[in-house]
Amino acid sequence: MFTGIIETLGSVIKVDKNQSNIDFTIESSISNQLKIDQSVAHNGVCLTVTKVEGNTHTVTAIDETLAKTNLGDWKVSTLVNLERCMQLNGRLDGHIVQGHVDQTAICLSVTETQGSWFYTFEYQSNFNHITVEKGSITINGISLTVVNSQNNQFSVAIIPYTFENTNLKTVQVGSKVNLEFDIIGKYIAKLVGLKG
């Protein structure tokens, strides 16, 4: 379980194909504090640490993960949002994030508006996923608030701190991002669907 508050950025330094899986080695300021078998969110994807060496750690993405996330696009030097799992005795600063990406979205526009940024994304609507204005959405593991919700599209406004300290600064028109929709919204949509 995560909160969507990014701890640090990591950089992919090695990509190894291992049959249908890919092993990613990532360098970051928290890698040396991790331990093998620990769950860490990488761009919002909960992955298990398989190796720790100095300031690097390695995780494995299986075929299923590669097909449903943007991890298949990662290459050496890709910036990755990192968050360790939440502690139950700590504050929940973002919202409840499972680390289970629902689908990807494509960035339609990025607009700078006097020191902040406004991003619009489009996603496939055939999965019964929804957004609501002022509701929560997780983009590349970042807990954000929806400011404009439409059918299969939504927008978010980004403050300078989030822009500088996450990989949103690398997202451009056409970029693919990972989405995790709000867990409460997903349950409500499922219940409404069952009753309909």
Image (cartoon, rainbow, N blue to C red):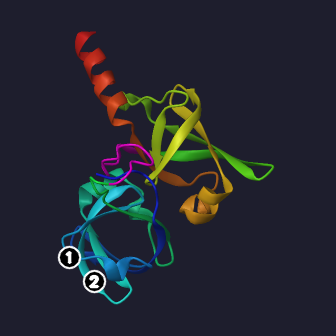
Residue at 54 percent of width and 31 percent of height: 134
Left or right side of 13 for 168? right
- Up-down: is 81 above or below 2? below
Give the spatial CA distance, label 2 vs label 1. Answer: 7 Å
Q: Position of residue 151 (x, y in %)?
A: 52, 25
Going from N to C along the chain, the mark reached first, 2 or 1, is 1
Q: Please identify the residue farthest to the right as the structure is shown.
A: 114
115 drawn magenta: no
91 drawn magenta: yes
Q: Where does label 1 land, which residue?
A: 36
Q: Is residue 16 visible?
A: no
Range of the magenta residues?
Answer: 90-104
Residue 52's disc is 2
Q: Amino acid at mark 2?
A: Val
Q: Position of residue 196 (x, y in %)?
A: 28, 9
Quarter of image, res 46:
bottom left
Residue at 72 percent of width and 50 percent of height: 116
Residue at 43 percent of width and 30 percent of height: 125
Q: Amino acid at mark 1?
A: Ile
